[in-house]
Amino acid sequence: MDGETIRTIATGAAAVLAGFGGAGIAGWFNRKNTKTTIEAVKVQAELDRNQGHMQWLRDRKVKCYAEFLAQSSSAQKALAIIHTNDVNKIVQIKELVVLNSDELLILAPRHIYDAAIDVMNGITAIAQATEPNSDANARDAAYGGAYRTFIEKYTTLERLIPHDLGVEELTEADA
């Protein structure tokens, strides 16, 4: 073996080692970048899942609150028609709305659920005030008091709901 051959073999060996070294270093960086990318994708997927759940929960609350308020209003209006003793209007009422608070209990925070119970109690008070009574003046007075209480509780509930949905900031006067 002459000197030229040894130089060629040494240069080739150095090139092979440099290639393996460069590939090793590049592989290490790629592995690190791949780990970082996978972790970032996992975090983003978790954020997306949480965001999707929060949107689903908000949509359910909006539907639940809207149905409860509509049913409360319908029940109050039906009771007002019954209170007037207008037979033609009473016939138009197919059924008195029965309020179901189960979904509200599951979805709503305690202060909103309590306000909804107050609304339902107000409807019950109006219903009791519409029952036939020998004294029409006392019946009208009881109905008027129950109606005012219902409107106050209903308005309070309407004021609390947007705060739970994040539409408005809750002030000390609302709490």
Image (cartoon, helix red, strand yellow):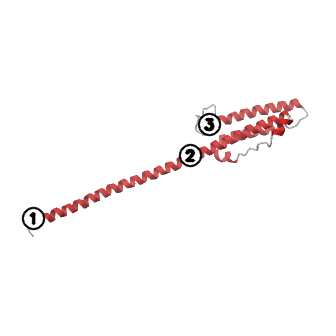
Figure quadrant of the C terminus = top right
Which quadrant of the view contains residue 126? top right
Figure quadrant of the N terminus = bottom left
The amino acid type found where label 1 is placed reads Glu
User: Above or below — where is 50 with respect to 168?
Assistant: below
In percent of the image, x 64 and y 33: which residue is there?
174
In percent of the image, x 81 and y 33: which residue is there?
143
Q: Disc 3 on helix, strand or loop?
A: helix
Residue 67 shows up from this direction? yes
Residue 114, given in percent of the width and then of the height, sits at 69, 41
Dot 2 and dot 1 residues touching (CB under 8 Å): no
Q: Nearer the viewer, mark 1 or mark 3?
A: 1
Labels 1 and 3: the sequence-earlier one: 1
User: Above or below — where is 37 with respect to 71?
Assistant: below
Whole-Å distance between the Cαs marked 2 and 3? 16 Å
Residue 64, given in percent of the width and then of the height, sits at 66, 44
Residue 84, given in percent of the width and then of the height, sits at 84, 33
